[in-house]
Amino acid sequence: SEEEEEDDDAVEDVSEEGEDEGEVGQFGFAEAEKFAEEEEYDEDDDAEEKEEEAESGSPSAAPAHDAMEDSDVSEDEEEQKTGSGKKSARQKARERREREKETREVELANASGDWKRNPRGPDDFERLVLMSCSASSSTSDMPSASEVWIQYMGYWMQMAEVQRARECAERGIKQRLGFRDEQDRLNLWIAYLNLEAHICVEGGRKKEALKRVEDLFKRAASYNNAKKVHMAMCDVWSRAGADDLTLEVYKRTAEKFGHSKKVWMKYLEFLYSTGKLSEARQNCLPRALRLTDKRKHSLIATRAAKLEYKYGTVERGKTIFESLLASQPKRLDIWSVYLDEHINANKEDPDAVRSVFDRAVTLKLKPAKMKFFFKRWVNFEQSYGDAEHLDLVKEKAREYVMALEKSRRADDIGEEED
């Protein structure tokens, strides 16, 4: 297969590099080759030692005690004896052992596939890039194409190589093969935007840097889903801490995609979370309800009510929920969100929550929906109420069940008489 051929090529490359540097062996270090190399090396060392002895004027055969003394001589002294720039036999042997150790580590990493999970340098990343081009989907051993390129960009940023990180991003977005879907490709564009926005903010938001981000943003919007890119750009500036630029992009996005409830809901969340409450209440929410379809209004208003509970005031949030339920009293999804928010905001004031439950259980709804309210009320009293109110709720539930059974019997009698 293509992956096996690429792995074989990579192994041959490693082997060729080892041969160029005088390294020993292939995978496993074949014993015959290893011993042959060592014997050749020993002969070379003997010849070099004889030459050194001839130069120093010492005899080739030294006494035993002289050999013991020589073994204690430091490597620096040996280097001085043999002259500057010329390595001793001991230094050469040590360097050879280090090269062998590095080669073994590389071979073991290649054999175990660790380089896929933990790439350590450009060579590993380049191999991952080649493999990602032929992979149809990501696995535990093979990440997606966007993940490979994003990790590669991160590697260069850790090395403070900004230009190389940019070049890496450019190569990635121009790659045509290997991406699982459009979202996978979009992830790489977003990472590139994050990179440029980070550089821009860290560099003092210079005019050239802002223009670079804007140009990249336009390119991304032209090659991908424009709405997704606009919403992603809002998140990019927000993560970079540039709230003014985030607000500017939100305004442009709302102008261009005013029909989208997702755009308005994210816009509202940004305004509330950054303390721009008047802008959210007086401008953003009315515009959202005016420009979107009526069927989307309940979702937008529900989000606004939740944001009021979280960032604004409880009374405003309650008012929005009450107005929604006045026109749609049977919407259990709205009731559920309303109860969740109201309970979280009034844990110290159970009576405020009980008033909402009292109104809910008087509605003329189907038994299954009424069961929902009684069950929620019982859970509330068990968590935040007391035994007395819990008994009252259970009594209300029994009364409802008895009234329901009475009504059913009356209906059955009426049918029999008919």
Image: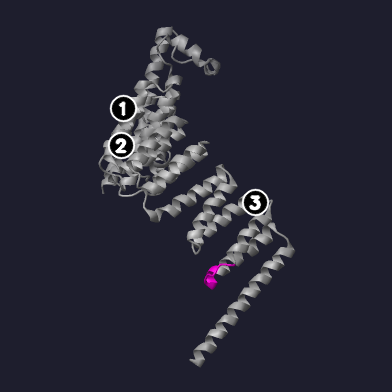
Helix, strand or loop at mark 2:
helix
Residue drawn at point x = 58 percent, y = 78 percent: 404
Q: Amino acid at mark 1?
A: Asp
**Residue 322 image position (x, y, % from top left):** 54, 55
Q: Looking at the image, tell me whether mark 3 or mark 2 is earlier in sequence order.
A: 2
Q: Is residue 248 above or below residue 375?
A: above
**Residue 323 image position (x, y, % from top left):** 51, 55
- Total marks shown come to 3
Q: How would you rate the neighbour count of disc 3 (Cα within 10 Å): few for under 14, some for 14-19, many for 20 or more?
A: some
The mark found on residue 346 in the picture is: 3
Give the alpha-carbon distance from disc 2 to disc 1, as whole Å: 44 Å
Helix, strand or loop at mark 3:
loop
Q: How would you rate the neighbour count of disc 2 (Cα within 10 Å): few for under 14, some for 14-19, many for 20 or more?
A: many
Q: Amino acid at mark 3?
A: Asn
Q: Looking at the image, tell me whether mark 3 or mark 1 is earlier in sequence order.
A: 1
Q: Which residues are magenta?
A: 362-369
Helix, strand or loop at mark 1:
helix
**Residue 1 image position (x, y, % from top left):** 26, 49
Discs 3, 1 touching: Cβ within 8 Å: no
Snapshot quadrant of residue 195: top left
Q: Which residue does the numbered mark 1 point to in the structure image?
A: 20
Q: Which residue does the numbered mark 2 point to in the structure image?
A: 220
